Image (cartoon, rainbow, N blue to C red):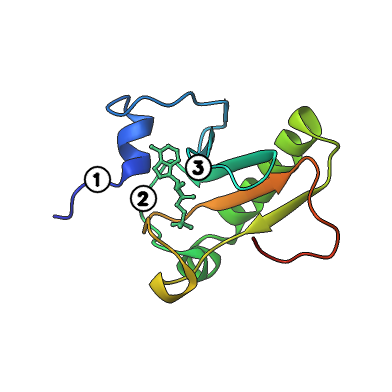
Amino acid sequence: MSEPSIFTRILEGEIPSEIIAQTDRVFAIRDIAPRAPLHLLVIPKSAQYRDVVELAAGDPSLMAEMVALAQQLADEHADGDFRLIFNRGAGAGQTVFHVHAHVLGGGLTEGSLGD
Ligand code: AMP
């Protein structure tokens, strides 16, 4: 069996981080290294899916739930607009192989796609 992911360890309280919102299946935390005025991570509670491609194929409704929570958080913590990023694979910068969405908002540079 593989080690629990860092996000599972946060969910289980082994690593300190404030869970700022949750549903039955999804939770959200602040990214420890923010790259925008608002930088949250929306994460399924289950570590079953390693990346967005597995998630979309395996449970589209869970992915929809993540998108809905991203909108709710952008409404609560910014002006409602946000950028949603899934890194898929180490070559694209994925470091945690427990699928998660980056929610970026609160004053993004117009027209910019990345950092
Ligand atoms: P990715 O590179 O797409 O896999 O994203 C992983 C993200 O997790 C990075 O943006 C990290 O800054 C973030 N991260 C890693 N450890 C923690 C932590 N303990 N609490 C919050 N965010 C974290």
Please tell me which residue is depicted at 55% across the width and 66% down the height of the picture: 56
Label 2 and label 3: CA atoms lie apart by 22 Å
Q: How many marks?
A: 3
Nearer the observer, disc 2 or disc 3?
3
State the image coordinates of residue 44 (x, y, percent, origin top left): 48, 45
Farthest-out residue, left: 1
Element class at badge 1: loop
Q: Which residue is mark 3?
A: 33
State the image coordinates of residue 36 (x, y, percent, origin top left): 67, 45
Query: Looking at numbered disc 2 in the image, what kind of residue is underneath it?
Result: Ala
N-terminal of the two: label 1 or label 2? Answer: 1
Q: Residues within 10 Å of mark 2 (few under 14, many from 20)?
A: some
N-terminal of the two: label 2 or label 3? Answer: 3
Circles 1 and 2: CB atoms closer than 8 Å: yes
Query: Looking at numbered disc 1 in the image, what kind of residue is underneath it?
Result: Pro
Element class at badge 3: loop
> Relative to residue 15, is residue 68 depicted above or below?
below
Determine if the C-beta at disc 3 is less than 8 A from ligand 1: yes
Q: For the N terminus, give its image quadrant.
A: bottom left
N-terminal of the two: label 1 or label 3? Answer: 1
Query: Looking at numbered disc 3 in the image, what kind of residue is underneath it?
Result: Ala
Image mark for residue 30: none
> Relative to residue 87, is residue 67 depicted above or below?
above
Nearer the observer, disc 1 or disc 3?
3
Q: Residues within 10 Å of mark 1 (few under 14, many from 20)?
A: few
Label 1 and label 2: CA atoms lie apart by 8 Å
Image mark for residue 4: 1
Please tell me which residue is depicted at 59% across the width and 55% down the height of the picture: 63
Q: Is residue 95 left or right of residue 22?
A: left
Q: Which residue is mark 2?
A: 47
